[in-house]
Amino acid sequence: MRKFETLLLLSPELSADNREGIITGLVAIIEREKGVMVEVDNWGMRDLAYPVHKLMRGFYVRLEYQGPAPLVAELERNIRITDGIFKFVTVKLADEVAGEVA
């Protein structure tokens, strides 16, 4: 299994319940696609360097997970069709993960 990280920029207009619903849905997709969630890191509301959808603030969330490569394609497909997610980027952190998740 490979180790990945996805950084999400969510709309600042989403309520806390809607944000949690989106994140829970993405975690469920990762687990459904035979992945293992390592960490969900809420960075919170931040100022943006330039306007995104005419807004100057956004809510950042970092997802760190392990899984097969096709998992990323399915996760990103779902991210693209989810309302409230402005931008995202996925990075491969490691080709092979040795041992069990801590």
Image (cartoon, grey):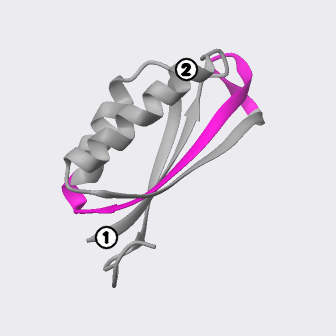
Instruction: Give the residue displayed 27% in from the left and 49% down from the top.
Output: 31
State the mark number for residue 2: 1
In the picture provided, is 38 more to the left or to the right than 16? left
Q: What numbered label is drawn on residue 17?
A: 2
Q: Which mark is residue 35?
A: none
Find the magenta span and give its range.
50-70
Determine whether 42 is above or below 21 in the image.
Answer: below
Seen at 34% across and 24% down, the residue is 81
Q: Residue 2 placed where, x, y %?
A: 31, 70
Question: Is residue 3 within the magenta segment?
Answer: no
Looking at the picture, tell me which residue is in the foreground, 29 or 82: 29
Q: Is residue 28 positioned above or below 67 on the image?
A: above
* Relative horizontal placement of residue 95, taking residue 42 as reference (left or right): left
Was residue 66 drawn as part of the magenta stretch in this picture?
A: yes
Disc 2 versus disc 1: distance between alpha carbons? 31 Å
**The quadrant where residue 28 appears:** top left
Residue 56: image quadrant is: top right
Q: Amino acid at mark 1?
A: Arg
Above or below for 58 versus 15: below
Query: Which x, y percent locates residue 78?
Result: 30, 32
x 24%, y 52%: residue? 71
How many other residues sit within 10 Å of disc 1, few (<14), some (14-19) or many (≥20)?
A: some
Give the main secondary structure, helix, strand or loop, of the magenta stretch: strand
Q: Is residue 55 left or right of residue 81?
A: right
Which quadrant would residue 46 be assigned to in this image?
Answer: top right
Amino acid on which disc 2 is placed: Asp
> How crowded is the residue under tag 2: few (<14 C-alpha within 10 Å), some, or many (20+)?
few
First in sequence: mark 2 vs mark 1: 1
Point 44% across, 18% down: residue: 83
Query: Can you give x and y, in whole percent of width and height, for residue 79 in the image?
Result: 38, 33
